[in-house]
Image (cartoon, grey):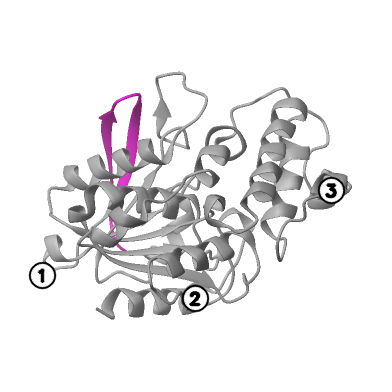
Amino acid sequence: MAEVETRELTVPGATLRYDIRSAPTGGTPDENILFLVGSPMDAVGFTTLASYFTDRTVVTYDPRGTARSQRHDGAAQSTPQEHADDLRQVIEALDAGAVDVFASSGGAVNALALVERHGDLVRTLVAHEPPAAQVLPDREAALAVIADIHATYLRDGMGPAMAKFIAVSGRKGLFPADWADEPAPDPAAFGLPTQDDGSRDDPLLGQNLLTCTGHQPDFTALQGAPTRIVIAVGQESEGELAARAAARIAERLGLAPAVFPSHHGGFLGGEYGQHGAPEAFAKALRHALEDS
């Protein structure tokens, strides 16, 4: 098992903590770093996936406001631009030149924002299911649904809002204009709390939901970047918001999306109680990174 070194980096408004799984003996670090990026998922979520890349130096981190990376500025929300600048500073702190990046979900939105601004720092980006609802043909309805989830969180707390989030993220197809007439899902049906504990510090529902899904990629900047970009979708995710957004981004970039095994969390091997197909997923990722 690779040794893990945890480092700390102070950035404007936050202290970031990131992990480095040691480079292989005889390896060349500046040509072998793989940065695994999620949001708001922290480094723990990549534990299984990292175990399939023991031939590489693997870096994982906790995004600002999540797990070990505390915010100090009191801000209620984080933007993809802030996260992109955090990623830039972690990569620069590694002092190893350009890196390969696998980024999933909100992390993929943030990594695309990084490439828009600092493409010289990323050799290959594999962006897995970025939920950028702004690119969808039904974006008005989709963004209204997402705004309702956030409003539910502020009004009623985590359980009711997370129940809506789970239902929305797994929904297949376009969002109808009359979505508000549909009955709200029962939190208990998902094993979620039905009582409001009064907290409003959830990094997904409070800090990142609106800004992540509302991000509009800069396609001109992405096409002009030196980075090789791969947009990936889960085999089981067809029709879901994040997969539809990924397909639209790929289309705008003139790319065919790469189909990865399993679903939105296909790389998970039991983290957070969720299971995908991590071994097959890792093989697909390795192929995507090497197919240059």
Q: CA distance from mark 2 to mark 1?
A: 31 Å
Q: Are marks 2 and 1 in contact (CB under 8 Å)?
A: no
Around disc 2, counting alpha carbons within 10 Å, would you say few (fewer than 14), some (14 to 19), or many (20 or more)?
Answer: many
Q: Compare marks 3 and 2 and give the one earlier in the sequence.
A: 3
- Dot 1 falls on a residue whose secondary structure is loop
Say left or right for 20 vs 202: left
Which residue in the structure is indicated by mark 1?
A: 26
Badge 3 amino acid: Pro
Around disc 3, counting alpha carbons within 10 Å, would you say few (fewer than 14), some (14 to 19), or many (20 or more)?
Answer: some
Q: Compare marks 2 and 1 and give the one earlier in the sequence.
A: 1
Badge 2 amino acid: Phe
> Residue 193: which disc?
none
Occupied quadrant, residue 220: bottom left
Q: Which residues are magenta?
A: 1-19
Magenta span: chief secondary structure: strand
Around disc 1, counting alpha carbons within 10 Å, would you say few (fewer than 14), some (14 to 19), or many (20 or more)?
Answer: few
Q: Residue at x 23, y 40 (%)?
A: 89
Q: CA distance from mark 1 to mark 3?
A: 54 Å
The mark closer to the camera, 1 or 3, is 3
> Residue 260: which disc?
2
The mark closer to the camera, 2 or 1, is 2
Which residue in the structure is indicated by mark 3?
A: 185
Q: CA distance from mark 3 to mark 2?
A: 29 Å
Q: Residue at x 57, y 65 (%)?
A: 243
Quadrant holding the N terminus: bottom left
Q: Residue at x 50, y 48 (%)?
A: 41
> x and y percent of residue 212 in the render?
50, 44
- Dot 3 falls on a residue whose secondary structure is loop
Say left or right for 180 vs 30: right
In this view of the protein, which residue sits in the foreground, 204 or 214?
214
- Dot 2 falls on a residue whose secondary structure is strand
Badge 1 amino acid: Gly
